Image (spheres, grey):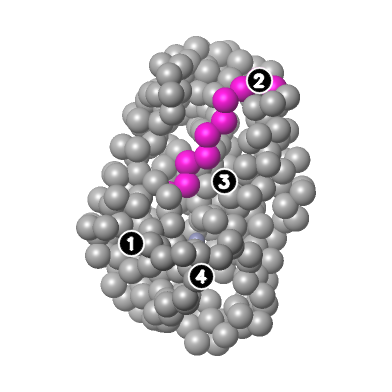
């Protein structure tokens, strides 16, 4: 049987739910510009790959992805679709409410869109825990790869940089066009970084303005970072590190212990 909810009948799903001990994985991403070398769906694709492998490793259920995120700052380039966070909160909450009605009482939300999606996901998750009495964890690859990042040789988190590009080169090389990749190294900003591994003091994140993004669009087609340093094998190791952590999170939920 497939780990994907949408590929099973409702009768099969009941079997899968019991086997999963009530755990459902919700991949959430974005549809937004990812430079000239990566597809617009990169963030959702990354969340889907992790959901699929995490679900297979733990016999849990992956549900249809939420392909949209909060992306107002990427509207400077075509193809970006941004949804208002208040709508996303309601959408994610309704997905969780439906799942909980059918016996899934532990939700793992995988966020492929990094820090920008986290704020609204937290609000929806808190509401679901309080009102529905379920457990929700947010699994964010940028936060869940801090140990790996120390040894990987990747630069800081940017946008369509070597981290995302390596990940995509590992799993979806047919959608990556390295000949079109343009570097635009992340500039060190005192007191401001979107990289969870940044060791200095930081201001809280607010999405960039359209003006900021126009600059990166002009300089490197929307990329911030150094995609020329990408490597499929590093992408594989990054992915495997994340799946190991994801497996640990899910097993912890299934055991009913601490996360
Ligand atoms: Zn991305």
Q: Is residue 169 visible?
A: no
Question: Mark 2 packing: few (<14 Cα in 10 Å), some, or many (20+)?
Answer: few
Which of the pair 153/22 is nearer the observer?
A: 153
Direction front: furthest residue: 201
Marks 1 and 2: in contact by CB < 8 Å? no
Mark 4 and mark 3 lie on one chain; the one further toward the N terminus is 3
| Residue topped by disc 2 | 133
Per the model, the C-alpha gap separating discs 4 and 2 is: 36 Å
Quadrant (top left, top right, bottom left, bottom right) of the N terminus:
top left
| Residue topped by disc 3 | 28
Question: Mark 3 packing: few (<14 Cα in 10 Å), some, or many (20+)?
Answer: many
Which of the pair 236/121 is nearer the observer?
A: 121
The image shows residue 13, relative to residue 241, as above or below, that is above
Name the element at disc 2.
loop
Using the image, tell me which numbered label, if any, was put on residue 192: 4
Q: Nearer the viewer, mark 4 or mark 3?
A: 4
Name the element at disc 1.
helix
Mark 1 and mark 3 lie on one chain; the one further toward the N terminus is 3
| Residue topped by disc 1 | 166
Which stretch is magenta?
Answer: 132-141
In percent of width and height, residue 173 lies at 35, 60
Mark 1 and mark 4 lie on one chain; the one further toward the N terminus is 1
Q: Is 18 displayed left or right of 239 in the figure?
A: right
């Amino acid at each position: 049987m497939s780990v994907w909810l949408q590929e099973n009948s409702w009768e099969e799903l009941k079997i899968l739910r019991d086997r999963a001990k009530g755990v459902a994985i919700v991949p959430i991403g974005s549809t937004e510009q990812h430079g000239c070398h990566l597809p617009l769906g990169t963030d959702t694709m990354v969340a889907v790959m992790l959901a699929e492998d995490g679900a297979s490793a733990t016999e849990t259920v992956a549900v249809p992805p939420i392909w949209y995120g909060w992306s107002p700052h990427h509207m400077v380039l075509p193809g970006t679709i941004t949804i208002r966070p208040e709508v996303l909160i309601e959408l994610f909450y309704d997905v969780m409410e439906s799942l909980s009605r059918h016996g899934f009482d532990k939700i793992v939300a995988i966020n492929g869109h990094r820090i920008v999606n986290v704020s609204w996901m937290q609000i929806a998750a808190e509401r679901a825990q309080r009102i529905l009495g379920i457990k929700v964890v947010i699994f964010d690859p940028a936060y869940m790869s801090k140990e790996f990042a120390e040894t990987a040789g990747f630069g800081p988190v940017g946008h369509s940089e070597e981290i995302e590009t390596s990940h995509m080169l590992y799993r979806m090389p047919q959608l990556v066009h390295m000949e079109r990749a343009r570097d635009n190294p992340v500039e060190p900003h005192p007191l401001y970084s979107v990289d969870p591994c940044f060791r200095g003091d930081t201001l809280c994140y607010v999405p960039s303005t359209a003006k900021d993004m126009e600059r990166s669009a002009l300089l490197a087609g929307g990329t911030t970072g150094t995609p020329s340093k990408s490597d499929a094998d590093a992408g594989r190791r990054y992915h495997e590190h994340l799946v190991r952590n994801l497996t640990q999170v899910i097993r912890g939920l299934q055991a009913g212990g601490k996360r």
